[in-house]
Image: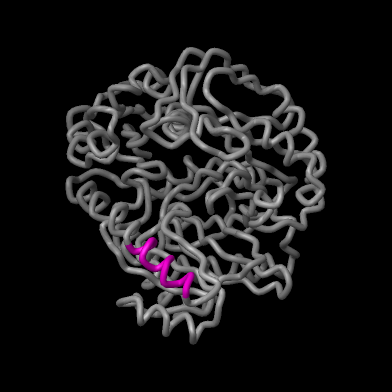
Amino acid sequence: MIESLLVANRGEIARRIIRTARRLGIRAIAVHSEVDAGLPFVLEADEAVCVGPANPAQSYRNAEAVLDAARSTGAQAIHPGYGFLSENAGFARTVEAGGLVWVGPGADAITAMGDKINARNLMAKAGVPVAPGTTEPAADLDAAVAAAAEIGYPVMVKAAAGGGGMGMGVATDEAGLRSEYDKVRSFAERMFGDGSVLIERYFPRVRHVEVQILGLADGRVVALGERECSVQRRNQKLVEESPSPAVSPELRERFLAAAVRAGEAVNYRNAGTVECLLDPATQEFFFLEMNTRLQVEHPVTELVYGVDLVEEQLRVASGLAPTFDPDALAPRGHAIELRINAEDPKRFLPGPGVIRTWVEPAGAGVRVDSGYVEGNTVTPFYDSLMAKLIVSGATRAEAIERARAAVAGFEIAGPKCNLPFFAELLENEEFLSGDYDTGIVGRMR
């Protein structure tokens, strides 16, 4: 096992990685921006290095500063968490070229899955279902119009280099396509440095279901069940649960087999997620994208499968066998994650501020992965995620009941907070039935 680990991230995920590292006797090193110096993840690390000002481009995304921190502290490995440098293939290559261990998939896998069109084509070749769409970027507006006419409206206009729900638009006709194409292309150029756009069939009623995979040190790829991620605002997730209430045993078998094929197609190592769209009417599913990193929602898989995914990541990176039997994976019970964000519960607009009150719920089946404590400041420089409230139970009904109590017992004052939204969701008949889709939040509003 590696002996020292630099965590190239912040907030709740950095704190969560540090927790596992210290349990395993690994020296945990944090990097932080100037404004994050007083946050729990910095104070809980064995060592911490300031890598720059608040602007993430000058700190957490500053590859050279992060590498300098690793060298100066004698770190043996780097764990990127999610976001920031986690899916930067160039950074992964530089880490390994410098003699450090990269706790994540290889740079070639990151590159292969980082471009939406390339990923779609690879998956189709591997026998993974893909939605009707372009196999090459739409070179210009005329090409996009021609592709949409062949695919059939409505269509999704997507940034080929996008991710995290960003860089997407829906067009129901040619006029809408002309508008969305320009908007998505401009956004993609600005955010990702790549204005390539693809056109896919859009499904008005669809569920977002993903599969957790783990590429083991011996070359095998295993799947640790699926997660339902259909409660979303602006194409970004708010709630995840496992198992998915929409997935039958037969469908689960097909989902997991397709996800394993996806991983095998790129010789995948370490943790990753194969995201799919599920048509509830036909029970057909289609590859959406592959996230070549640890996901925000990994705790629901941990609770249902009884594994510590960060520990498994570290074991793979160290060339060690997993703690579990890959041939005996089976889910037990049900888990739900709620993303507690510093945003208003109606329009979901960010609302940073000083945390005057922070009281976390506790009890059977309740876990809180938080990035803050009372007295900290949620700044406007980063994602609005403050904590993840994860609950588990023997059944979905029990998990929901525990979630209600936990939401009621979570006290946050200062920043705006979306806890009232979750209280509403947990009484919503559509959500309670399990028969919901990605439009549920819009219907609640």
Q: Is the N terminus in the top left, top right, bottom left or bottom right quadrant?
A: top left
User: Residue visible at 66% across and 70% down?
Assistant: 279
Across and down, in percent, residue 53 comes to: 24, 27
Residue 25 in the image: above or below residue 125: above
Q: How many marks?
A: 0
Across and down, in percent, residue 268 comes to: 41, 62
Q: Is residue 379 magenta?
A: no
Image quadrant of residue 340? Answer: top right
Across and down, in percent, residue 443 comes to: 70, 52
Residue 130 seen in render: no
Image quadrant of residue 412? Answer: top right
**Please, what is the dominant secondary structure of the magenta stretch?**
helix
Across and down, in percent, residue 131 comes to: 53, 76
Residue 155 in the image: above or below residue 376: below
Residue nearer the viewer, 442 or 105: 442
**Residue 395 appears left or right of 411:** right
User: Residue visible at 38% across and 62% down?
Assistant: 184
Q: Is residue 183 magenta?
A: yes
**Residue 444 appears left or right of 51:** right
User: Residue visible at 47% across and 17% down?
Assistant: 354
Residue 18 in the image: above or below residue 62: above
Q: Which residue is at the far front?
A: 175
Colour mapping:
one colour
Residue range of the region highlighted in magenta in the rendering: 175-185
Residue 169 seen in render: yes
